[in-house]
Image (cartoon, rainbow, N blue to C red):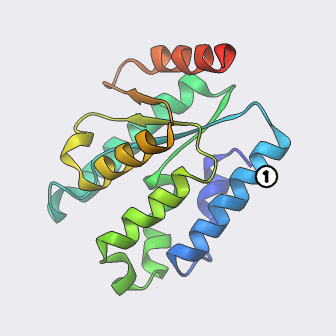
Amino acid sequence: MRSIENIQNYFLDSKSFRDIESKVTSLFANLKKTEPELDIIYVAGIISSDGKDFIQRNRQILANNTEKVREATRETAFVFSAEDIFDDKVIAKLDPNEISNEENWYQFWRNVLRSGVTHIVLTPRWEESKGATDEFLTANSIGLPIYYFNGINSHEIAWLIKTSRNSG
């Protein structure tokens, strides 16, 4: 199940962060079982830190950046971002109290990063996001390779990831 459309549908019946986290963990385990050499790359970036008026714009920018990384690593990696898991349909099914609590988001992504992610890619302005900053700190603390995407260097990132796999 490497198709992003299938991934988005995979989370549609989720009702909580715990449900989604369980599905992410299961998905990663299945990917690693069927494709042991597969890299699992999380793309992080700013979403809500500019305020409510800019969330949709920032989600689209993150989706576009994720797609660039996905295209560059298509043969060797499963690439995803928050936008791939938390589309409007999934968010609409979650408890508003649960999604309004920032700590729930931080804990969710900390757990996801520990559940099989092999690399993290930070997109422009990530440091302006409390969530992406927390993801950076988590990735750093658990030793995940961290790459900085500037909007055009997706093939360089793909090469670095491939090189790290071959040297490790």
In the rendered image, residue 155, in percent from the top left (x then y), is placed at 49, 16
- Please provide percent x and percent y for residue 107: 43, 65
Does 20 sit above or below residue 140?
A: below
Q: Residue at x 67, y 46 (%)?
A: 3
Q: Amino acid at mark 1?
A: Asn
| Residue position for label 1 | 30
Which residue is farthest right?
34
Q: Is residue 86 left or right of residue 57?
A: right
Give left or right: position of 45 versus 29: left
Residue 85: give x, y in percent of width and height: 52, 59
Name the spot of residue 41 as percent of width and height, x first.
55, 38
Q: Identify the image quadrant of residue 88.
A: bottom left
- Label count reads 1
Q: Residue at x 55, y 27 (%)?
A: 71
Tell me the quarter of the picture where residue 150 sits: top left
Measured along the vertical axis of the image, is residue 4 above or below residue 161?
Answer: below
Q: Is residue 20 left or right of residue 105?
A: right
| Residue 12 visible in this rendered orientation of the protein | no
| 25, above or below 150, in the image | below
Q: Which residue is depicted at the point 33% across and 44% down?
A: 45
